[in-house]
Image (spheres, rainbow, N blue to C red):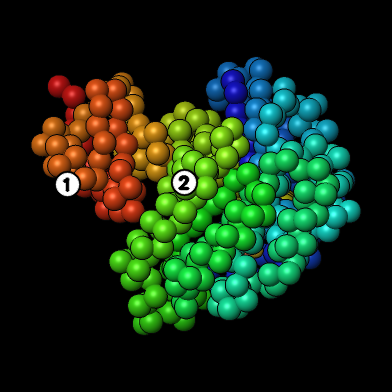
Amino acid sequence: MKLGLYLHIPFCKKKCPYCDFFSVTQKPDEELYLKALTKEIKLSSDFLKKQFEANKVTIDTFYAGGGTPSLISPSFFEKIFEKLSKTFDFKPLELTLEANPESLTLEKARDYKYVGFNRLSLGVQTFQKRGLKFLGRIHSPKESFLAIDAAFKAGFKNISLDFIYGWKGEGLKTLKKDLDLAFSSGATHLSFYELTLYPETTFFKKHQKDLYFLDEKRVLKLFSFIRNYLLDKGFHQYEISNYARSGFECRHNLKYWKMEPYIGIGAGAVSRIGNYRFENIKNLEKYFEKLLKEEILPNRIIERLDNFELAKEYIFMGLRLVEGIEISKLRDLGYILKEEALSLLVKSGYLRLSEEKMALTEKGMSLHNQVVKFLWKNLERLR
Ligand code: SF4
């Protein structure tokens, strides 16, 4: 069995007001986290053998995300890699570390590279002071430039920068400044995520009555601008929010969109294998308790998706990809999409359709959620 492996590092210096990822602001206790993860790796391997008869598990991608993985020392990851190599056939071609600009020094970048990482994903968000302030980030544009410089000097050849667009006060001129700087930085991969207000976040509470800056038309304009700019500069878009130089697409993240199996370790991490989905407890104390006292996996939710749910998820995830989805896969699950619905979407310019595949057009991508909901309503069982 081939799997991607995601490691969640749930520590941040400060909670960003828009963020809904699981993270805590306490200082990481690396030794304790390592102990728990070591146990989790062993229990996960036993579980895969027992539940999925996976006697040989090959890990072909590794991704340390968070949280803020760059708060953690390189030697911590070195020990994790050792443990993984002893437990699995650990041969990832891509090993990504998410890093925040304020916690990446040249020395650390060199050590991350030395222990085995070959891809860095830097959370720049924007190069504009105003934008960083609005987003509640703790780093400065200067720290982002220094971190990018450190990553290159350390020898990383595959560097991704993460941006958020749509923040209050950002117009096309400001966006172009970010794009110019992103392009000239030499990064091989760029992600541009639309600012989203998630319920339960401080941002949501603060801005729910003040949402004009998330106006759909405005955001669509920004989306098209980003897309046209980057395509023009030789990047190719492979997913709604993701652009890469040829050959630099993120192999690990592609697994999520293609619904390929991956395992997640660490507090709050999610795993998907076949039609199962697991989620680890989003509470650090309980996570430690389960692993170190009770010696059981800290899975809280175990879902078994039926074919209808899988077909829906395949449409949702697959249509984020520019290459789209294979119609035969829906048929294999026992479902088809109504012809009238598909022709309506094609006629209105939202969908591209061939015998084998269907994919969203630029117009369709900008309204991904609405198109997907419409398709879900028109999904019917094969007779
Ligand atoms: S640093 Fe990243 S993970 Fe941490 S709170 Fe901010 S956005 Fe969320």
The answer to whether residue 279 shows anywhere in this view is: no
User: How dense is the environment of label 1, judged by Cα within 10 Å: few (below 14), some, or many (20 and up)?
Assistant: few
174 lies left or right of 45: left
Ligand 1 location (quadrant)? bottom right
Residue at 19% over, 40% down? 346
Q: Circle 2 — which element?
A: helix
Residue at 60% over, 37% down? 248
User: How dense is the environment of label 2, judged by Cα within 10 Å: few (below 14), some, or many (20 and up)?
Assistant: few
User: Disc 2 marks which amino acid?
Assistant: Leu
Which residue in the protein does label 2 denote? 231
User: Disc 1 marks which amino acid?
Assistant: Ser
- Mark 2 and mark 1 lie on one chain; the one further toward the N terminus is 2
* Corner quadrant of residue 57: top right
255, 189: nearer the viewer: 189
Q: Position of residue 79 (x, y in %)?
A: 84, 40
Q: Position of residue 18 (x, y in %)?
A: 52, 69
Quarter of the rendering occupied by the N terminus? top right
The disc label shown at residue 331, or none: none
For residue 16, above or below residue 290 = below
46 lies left or right of 20: right
The answer to whether residue 383 shows anywhere in this view is: yes
Q: Circle 1 — which element?
A: loop
The disc label shown at residue 348, or none: 1
Q: Position of residue 52 (x, y in %)?
A: 55, 22
